[in-house]
Amino acid sequence: MKRIFIYAALSISFSTVKAQIGEPFIHDPSTIQECDGKYYTFGTGGGGLISSDGWSWHSGAERPGGGAAPDVLKIGDRYLIAYGATGGGLGGGHNGRILTMWNKTLDPKSPDFKFTEAVEVASTDGNEDCDAIDPGMLLDPTTGRLWLSYGTYFGYIRLVELDPRTGERVKGNEAIDIAIDCEASDLIYRNGWYYLLGTHGTCCDGVNSTYNIVVGRSRKVTGPYIDNVGRDMLQGGGKMVIAAHDRVVGPGHFGRIIEGDGVEKMSCHFEADFDQGGYSTLGIRPLLWKNDWPVAGEAFKEGCYEIESERRGYSLELAVDFTRLETARRWFRRDQNREIKPIEMQKLSDVEGSWPTGRVGVRCNDFMSRPHQRWTIENAGRGGYMGQPYYKIRIEGTNRVLTATAEREVVAETEFTGDDNQLWRIDMLTDGTYRIMPKAVPGTQEKLALVSIGDSSPTLAAFDFQSDNSKWNLKPLK
Amino acid sequence: MKEAKMLRWAVLFLLIVVNASANAQDIGKYFHPVKTNVSNTDQDGFIRRWRLLEPLDKPIRSNAGFTDTYLREVFSKQYFKGQMTAIPRDGQKVKAVHTEMELPSRSFRGPAPTDANGKPLEPKEVTKKETLKWHELESENYNVKLFRFGEAYGNRLYGVLYWAVTLIECDTDMEDVRLAVGSNSASIWWLNGEEVLLMSGDRRMVVDDCVSKRLTLKKGINVLRGSVVNGPGMSDFCVRFLDANGKPLNQLKIK
């Protein structure tokens, strides 16, 4: 048993942020789309990745036409795929062409899987200040109009309007210049703002690629797209959304994933993942909104945490006796002979013997950094969800695991069974707090989350992004 | 036979003329000739009047190696006489002689060229001898599209080194101003002979990307000299001065 705990401690202290598992190798991924319970993303050169859970990815998606950097949008019950028929190139030809085509399904094994004939919606003549590659699409939720941006470092990023019924260019529509000196653009809409995301930096140089994603915003889809210091993206402006971090470099090709109220993620590729042999790899990160600006959240790292309720600021703990630390009481009066040296923290071995041996309730209380308040959160090794694995949440150094009960409450059981009520989904919300949900609650199909029903009382209830009762802060502990 | 040969020459001449006029039409979207003695910075403070030298041949396959050390070596090299001192006139020619390390292939795409056995080819030292002309132009845009300038007046688009000079005339000393530059790709800038900005790395043209320390524009003529280097991609730059509060100086006299 001791050996197991030593191993566990080592594996946590050396753990890194895992990328998606399987074979998540792709360049220029399209926005991830769900189709019949599976997720799809397409990349440069044809083909793409499929995942049944958003965590484990494998090749198998099919897209004809080759070329570069597709995007996919679901309109009604069909999928519209846009892609650059050419490959671009800084020193090469710039006779770009953007094509669109439809399919009823993204599942290549479905009998309905058949692409319509691709139609050209934008092109460049090779000499003008634009190269028609790298399309990104937006179906404007306020008007129902369909927009497509495209372009690369060779001149401008341009915007054209497509017919959402046919996927063809609206007759008589003229392209508008909306940005300069970037590529892999994408458009999104939120709270009355249109956002233009573009990729800056050096592409395709492996571990030395400086690719990064920036954003500008506008009240009109046609621009001007202005950054956080008032600079137009036609002047090269852009506020950083995501750059290299830790062991991944060169994020490019933004895609937005809305999973629910307050739960958003973004997809991209990393030009090189140091933990994946330096290959270009699919990346999925939380998408946060700060002052109406999008910014990538950190990938969740396994480790030891305080789990603090956003409601009152109390923290999740085992419902066991608070054991006082017996040290000499220090007062603030001046003491000529005072001795200053560190005091040891309370250890698990100091208190564990006083804890009940079986199931223990959990509650929220003043955080005092005591053993019954220190939670180890680690990959449970039981599958995952969009961009992350399911987690096991246990008191540090023990096997007392957070468990959802059939009574829709939470307790700490003494053994990890691996059942769905001990697997936890942890999503960073758009405001930087977290939603914590069991994979399943026994006896119900309801999707419930860990919620503070009182300052000191956690329970399982429907998630409400508008309420601080539903939100948690995960504070790393040494 | 003679008539056929004459006809061929006539067609060739016609093609040259048509091509030249096409180029002239294209360049008109980006530059026009200087018509007055003095102009001003535009409403956003950008300097649009420049003396630009036709691009030097700089056989660079990738911008990945634009480190400070490499760039100082590139920009400190002597390419032509009066490089750091002359105030060029429109139409003035210079003879540039310089040695470069060059691969046999000038391709900017795909993997590095190899020999028949798949071994990467080693670059060889090549002496470049070029006669290049200065052009005094006003840019139609806030950013000076060197790529289009090179297309119209040079004989290469990629693997290029540009030189640019402009004159700023001040009625009094202007203290605590800053030079703000965006360039694609790396560049260096000297004010009155003193280096004030080095922009290293594989850069995109972004307004106010790099800003100098506080400077003084002296009373009289100030000489701003810059050089931009680029491998693949579209070369351009934008330059303005900012006042002590970071506001662009939009009434500077440019000669």
Image (spheres, rainbow, N blue to C red):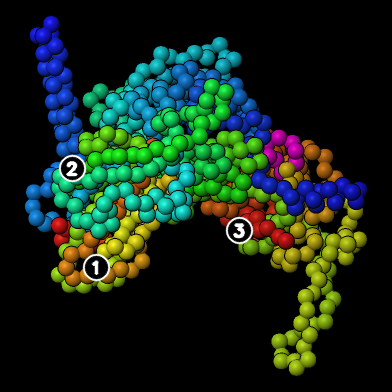
Pointer 2 residue: B31
Give the CA separation, mark 2 to mark 1. Answer: 27 Å
Residue A472: horizontal and vertical position, in percent? 63, 54
Say which of A153 and A63 sits in front: A153
Q: Can residue B141 be seen?
A: no
- Check disc 1 and give the amino acid type: Leu
Q: Can residue B63 be seen?
A: yes
User: At x 43% / y 42%, what residue is drawn?
Assistant: B63
Residue segment shown in magenta: A380-391
User: At x 75% / y 38%, what residue is drawn?
Assistant: A381
Callout 1: helix, strand or loop? strand
User: At x 25% / y 44%, what residue is drawn?
Assistant: B95
- The answer to whether residue B195 is above or below residue A223 is below
- The answer to whether residue B96 is above or below residue A39 is below
Callout 2: helix, strand or loop? strand
Q: Nearer the viewer, mark 1 or mark 3?
A: 1
Give the CA separation, mark 3 to mark 2. Answer: 59 Å
- Check disc 2 and give the amino acid type: Phe
- In the current view of this chain or complex, which residue is farthest to the top? B1
Give the CA separation, mark 1 to mark 3. Answer: 55 Å
Q: Determine which quarter of the picture holds residue B169.
A: bottom left
Magenta stretch: includes residue B85: no
Host chain of mark 1: B
